Every structure is written in structure tokens, then in C-alpha cells.
Amino acid sequence: LPAFLWGAWVELAGRVYPLTYLEDWLREKGGDTTYSGGFVEHYILPVMYPEHLTAHVETCLGIFVLAINILLYGWIIFSGRRKRSRTRNS
């Protein structure tokens, strides 16, 4: 929960993750160039939303992820209830 709250605050407040400053400093010390923006914009967004990704593919992927979550959480809840009912009947 603390990591989630910190990450949400950083994103919603428009701040850059503190490690981005450290990464930039280390890159400069190593003779490399820094990049503009933050870690998420530089590394994560291009992987999650590549340039060739269409709205249709994005929607299909979203539905796929949602379906997996519904199935997994449904299975967890169902198996938990089944175990409890077996222990009550024993």
C-alpha cells in the first residue's frame, strides 16, 4: 500500500521519480547522455503503447487482460468458498 500511494502521488502530482535524477547523474558520470522526461515515459510507455498499436488492438488487449483477471479472481473466490464449505461440513 505505501508503494502504491507513493507511486500514485508521484504520477498524479506530475513529479519525476527520484531515481530518475540518480540515473541521469550516473549516466553523465559514465559519459553517457541523459534523456528528457521520466523513467516511465522513456522505458515503460514505448513498451505498453508502441507506435504501431492501433485502437482496435489496444481494445482487444484490454478485454483480454480483463477476462484473465475475472477468471483468476473468480477461481480464487470460488475455490476459497468451496474449501470453507468443506470444512464446515466435516
Image: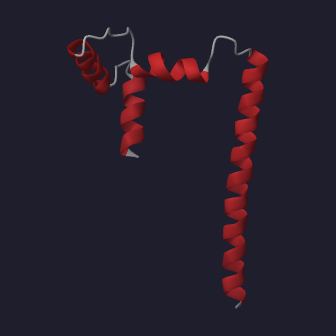
Residue at left offset 71%, top offset 68%: 79
Residue 27, position as x, y percentages in the image? 28, 16
Instruction: Please state if 9 lies on the left or on the right of 76 as rendered.
Output: left
Position above or below: 76 against 28:
below
Residue lying furthest left in this view? 29
Position of 45 with respect to 63 (left or right) is left
Which of the 4 quarters of the picture holds residue 77? bottom right
Can you give x and y, in whole percent of width and height, for residue 69 in the image? Answer: 68, 46
Rendering coords of residue 28 (x, y %) = 24, 12
Does residue 10 lie above or below 4 as drawn?
above
Give the quadrant of the C terminus: bottom right
Instruction: State how the image is colored.
Output: secondary structure
Q: Exactly how many numbered labels are in the figure?
A: 0
Q: Residue furthest front?
A: 31
Indicate left or right for 78 with 19 as reference.
right
Name which quarter of the figure residue 81 lies in.
bottom right
- Looking at the image, which residue is at 57% across and 22% down? 47
Residue 15: where, in percent of width, then height?
34, 19
Q: What residue is at 72 percent from the left and 45 percent from the top?
A: 68
In depth, the one of 53 and 77 nearer the eye is 53
Is 31 above or below relative to 19?
above
